[in-house]
Amino acid sequence: MTATRRTVLGGLSALAAAPALGGARPDVVVVGGGFGGATAARALCRLGLGVTLVEPARTYHACPLSNAVLVGLRPMASQVFGYGGLAAAGIRVVHDRAVAIDGSARRVRLAGGDSLAYDRLIVSPGIEIRLDAIPGYDASASEMMPHAWKAGPQTETLARRLAAMEDGGLVVLTVPDNPYRCPPGPYERASLIADYLKARKPRSKLILLDAKDVFSKQPLFEEAWATRYPQHLEYVPRARGGRLAEVDASAMTLRAEAGTFRPSVASVIPPQRAPEICRAAGLTDAGGWCPVDPVSFESRRVSGVHVIGDAAMPGAMPKSAFSANDQAKVCAQAVADLLRGRAPAPPKLVNVCYSLVAPGRAVSIAGVYGIEWDTLVAIPEAAGISPVGAPENLRAQEAAHGEAWFEAVTAEMFG
Amino acid sequence: MPLSVGSRSARVVLLCLVGAPAVADDVPPPGASSCAVCHAACGPVPAAPPCLRNRTPDQIAEALDAYRTGTRTGTVMPYLAKGFSREEIRALAEHLGQAAPR
């Protein structure tokens, strides 16, 4: 019976264009086609399960390395991927938006009106940019002061504004409090913009307003700023009034305790939370993220639903593409185990993240995460950052490692 | 159902099941999912981390033990290796080395 059913499901999963979605019953539905979802779909497929991936966009814009696009170091095209490789591997790719999850009926409803049944559901929807957190920062303000924290049109808008800015202009970049997607990302962005100003618009300056005093890879960024950009980057931590209080997009002003700024170019990275579908499905906690079991990534709120990537809160892991990729593989194995009536083994997960401090120069952070009681904790002796004061060739080697990781992981997902 | 659709389905099922017999009952050891991405670039990429499919389990275990005990230096590996016991390292090495095409 099982073999017959698997064959039938596999056969159905090939019929991507079949109109009667309600008639299909794949084993696993994955919501979201980014670093978590696309990886999970590929891993489930390798494990022999029928997989349907629900993703509204026809192309994916990858965030890692997109800060390099802002200053002309990479073309946008190098961040863009299609879903043809997933379909060719036997995954049914449905370009629609998941709008509701019925955990008791085990169905996902789509914006187009169809619904999909699942035995297990993996939700990997990324983040929602909060447009209700900073007074004045609403949808239209986000066009004037782009966050560019989801790679795509805002990345190109911010790149155009930087390119069009006259020499002597002020750039203001603001950073939210934890937790948020890609903890070192804002500081990489600040470094690359400062490098661009120093080289191309030397009378200009970047002010970095931060809602916190302590951040990822801090000694390495501070070293890079002091040695490379002393005239072009000013860091204002929370303790010196760096927390953004309010913006006025029409007047192009930003107010913090440290003062009111009227820059030529602003990028405001607001606080974030798990997207609407997670709240609607009852997957989120009071903090706005999805608590999960760290062994299987199954929601602590809704059984049969697993949450991975930035939307999940499995413990100490940072919200990074590397984490999402690793969580996806661990979750896929756990889902396969559970569907086969086997308890998943306690995993160990890894995060490695590279940040550019200048073109072709990167620093890294690395960590291993294990289960302690009922959460994921960082193993203290296995956590660290690149050495401060390292020679340029080490920074160059890490930049190459970062790029090699990006090429390999995107090939694994989309190739 | 048209014949062409049937044959396409069959082909896709085969593709989706490639590798499945090996992994279905052979659960990778803890941490294994993390290694392959960075160490999978086995083409001519000079700056990429070494390709593990070209190494034997003994070579991989020896390298990880050296990182773990601090006798070998590196960038992220001295940290990552300390997250695993000797037994876990052995299991990882067997798993990653076994993936080698022979």
Image: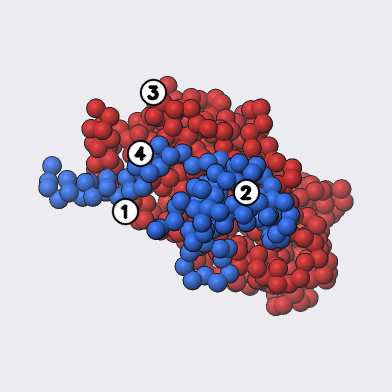
Chain colours: A red, B blue
Q: CA distance from mark 4 to mark 2?
A: 27 Å
Kindly identify the amino acid type of the residue bearing the numbered disc 3. Answer: Ala
N-terminal label among 3 and 4: 4
Of the 4 image quadrants, the one containing the N terminus of chain B is top left
Q: Residue furthest right?
A: A240
- Front of the two marks 4 and 1: 4
* Image location (x, y in percent) of residue A125: 51, 42
* Image location (x, y in percent) of residue A28: 38, 36
Q: Residues within 10 Å of mark 1 (few under 14, many from 20)?
A: some
Q: In the image, which disc is placed on residue A105?
A: 3
Q: Chain under label 2?
A: A
- The quarter holding residue A353 reads bottom right
Kindly identify the amino acid type of the residue bearing the numbered disc 1. Answer: Ala
N-terminal label among 2 and 3: 3
Q: CA distance from mark 3 to mark 4?
A: 21 Å
- Front of the two marks 2 and 3: 2
Q: CA distance from mark 3 to mark 1?
A: 30 Å
Task: Identify residue for label 1.
Answer: A88
- The quarter holding residue A354 reads bottom right
Task: Identify residue for label 2.
Answer: A351
Q: Residues within 10 Å of mark 2 (few under 14, many from 20)?
A: many
- Report the front residue among A184 and B100: B100
A90 lies above or below B50? above
N-terminal label among 3 and 1: 1
* Image location (x, y in percent) of residue A136: 69, 47
At 32% across and 45% down in the image, what residue appears?
B17
- Residue A315 appears in the rendering: yes
N-terminal label among 1 and 2: 1
Report the side of B28 relative to A68 (left or right).
left
Q: Residues within 10 Å of mark 4 (few under 14, many from 20)?
A: many
